[in-house]
Image (cartoon, helix red, strand yellow):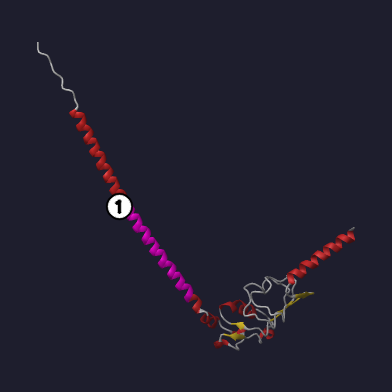
Amino acid sequence: MKLGSCLLLLMASMSHVVSECLPCRCSSGIVDCSFINLDTQSLPASFSSSTEVIRLDKNKLNSIPSGLLDRLPNLREVHLKHNPWHCDCDILYLRSWLQAQQKRSLYRDVICESPESLKGRVIMYLTEDELVTTCQYWYCNLALVSQLCLCIFIVVQGILLIFVIFSLRRFQRIAREARRTAKELQQNNETYAYDNIPLCSFDRT
């Protein structure tokens, strides 16, 4: 009975490890994701904390999601060569991670494939100013969208203000007419009551 329980537990743990590694291949601390045409979107969302080596070479990666290589205390090296790295804002995380490594000699072949102005440059040695310059268009687009939203907001506020002003004026006009009508009705009632007062005749003896 105990042997059966142990086997079931072992099978469950093995199936968990296999599902965690897909689409890569895992064995004794090594996660092999090379030669499987991985791109940034199809990368595993996380790696086991026991991972020591990750092979990501010879794929279609152009960046690494922020935080993917963090919280791996046993990680010794990551193979990143032969990928079409696009060196813009999205590469800042990988650059920071590479600069924090002690074995920098392992990453001197991790180079930019695009844009043309940075092609062939070692990612680890790129400056932050160079990367920010390559993606300023993104900030410009964001600023343009923000200004457009602000303009729409102001226009909507103006329309609402005009609507409120017209509504108040209409309410005031209706209120004035109501007061005038009430006053006229009151005057008519008073006149009608005065005209219908009976005349009293006094007999003189």
Magenta-drawn segment: 140-168
On whether residue 5 falls in the magenta region, the answer is: no
- Report the front residue among 130 and 15: 15
Q: What residue is disc 1 on?
A: 169
Residue drawn 47% across the image and 76% down it: 140
Give the image quarter of residue 74.
Answer: bottom right
In the picture provided, is 170 more to the left or to the right than 154?
left
Q: Main secondary structure of the magenta part?
A: helix
Q: Is residue 161 magenta?
A: yes
Is 86 drawn above or below residue 176 in the view shown? below
Q: Can residue 152 be seen from the camera position used here?
A: yes
Instruction: Check disc 1 and give the amino acid type.
Output: Arg
Which residue is pictured at 45% across the width and 73% down the height?
144
Q: Quadrant of the N terminus?
A: bottom right
- Residue farthest to the top, as pictured: 205
The image quadrant of residue 48 is bottom right
User: Residue 190 at what x, y percent from top left?
Assistant: 21, 32
Residue 17 horizontal/vertical position (percent): 77, 69
Taking the image as shown, residue 163 lies to the left or right of residue 133, namely left
